[in-house]
Amino acid sequence: MDILNAIIQGIVQGLTEFLPVSSSGHLSITQHITGMQEDNLFFSVMLHIGTLAAVIAVYFKKIGKLLKAFGLMVKDIFTGKFKWSKMDEERNMVMMLIIGLVPLFLLFLPIPGTDMKIKDLADMFSKSGYFVIVGISLLVTSLLLLFGDLKNRHTTKTYLSKKGKNADKNQAGRKKYTVLDAIAVGLTQCCAAVFPGVSRSGSTLVASEMRGINKQAALDYSFLLGTPAIIAAALLEGKDALFPEDGQAVTIEFLPVLVGVIFSAVVGFLAIKLFKWLLKTDRMYIFIIYTGIVGIAVLVISIIELSNGVNFFTNQPLVF
């Protein structure tokens, strides 16, 4: 892999991982257009490590407080001093993050009548014959973001009617999560993991907003919830990358990998900051329009492909 390719992939990963446009959907589109499948699993894993570094850099203090709260909470549980009703803000967030992650285990459930697990559907839907799924999923993302934006505007309007027009509209909505909130967001993240084109960050943000959560608190929860998922995916895929089933030696090009990681981390950091600013200034319509246009384009192309039986760009037979 050359340096330029590593830079491009690092930038794309950093942008699409955090902005509500779906990294998996854009990966499927790129592979569909070029006819090339991602064959460097180790490089892909390292790009995820780069985006993980971006999250940690943005939420360094918050993550530190949550880890401390988790340690003290575990101590209280084993000493019999833990009380649910006495949890402070950090402990409540830790518990809600744990609850929000539980639905991800549903992805490992087997699909009756097949040798597949639910999580395997994501790989299947990424094949060229299922390109229509990507288009539909991007349109779903656009609609979800629209619903979330409308709900947030309603929450803000209600808040200002109670507090007065001079009140800070960014304070509208609840900041503390409940068990039902965490379950709703967790199930949404689980569904987003299956369909390439459904944005994880966007859909989990919307799930929180629909529950009446403050928009900035919702975005913070979404990113923090994604951190353990990125770590788990990196560990699982990293094992497969370094120790493939065929036993072949893995060739690692350190310079392109390092460059890709740096770019994914830096761009990811900037993407998080950009997302937070766009949400704060009510500019989510940018992503609503973008995912809608791309979704329609992909849907039209996929319908043409299904009628012809070949890839629109490479003229290769569709793979199901």
Image (tube, rainbow, N blue to C red):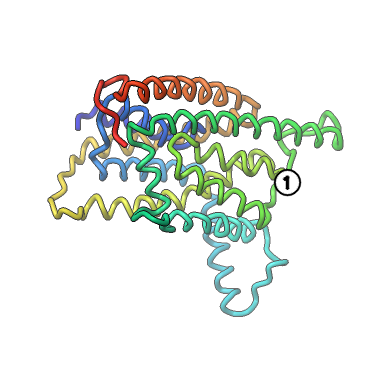
What secondary structure is found at the residue carrying circle 1?
A: loop
Residue 117, quarter of the rendered image: bottom left
Answer above or below: position of 113 versus 35.
Answer: below
Q: Is residue 157 above or below residue 218?
A: above
Image quadrant assignment for residue 210 = top right
Q: Bin the neighbour count of mark 1 within 10 Å (Cα to Cα): few under 14, some 14-19, many 20 and up.
A: some
Q: Is residue 185 left or right of residue 197?
A: right
Residue 178 relative to residue 231: left or right: right
The C terminus: image quadrant: top left
Residue behind mark 1: 174
Q: Please tell me which residue is depicted at 29% across the width and 30% down the height of the picture.
A: 318
Q: Nearer the viewer, residue 227 or 137?
A: 137
- On the image, the x and y values in percent for residue 253 come to 18, 40
Q: Nearer the viewer, residue 113 or 23?
A: 113
Residue drawn at (42%, 29%), measured in percent from left and top? 132
Report x, y in % for residue 48.
37, 43
Q: Residue at x 60, y 74 (%)?
A: 76
Q: Identify the residue at horizontal 33%, vertical 27% (top origin).
A: 30
Q: Nearer the viewer, residue 102 or 311?
A: 311
- 275 over 103 or under it: above or below: above
Whole-percent x and y of residue 189?
52, 46
Tell me how many marks there are.
Answer: 1
Give x and y (percent) for residue 27.
36, 32
Q: Quadrant of the N terminus?
A: top left
- The type of residue carrying mark 1 is Arg
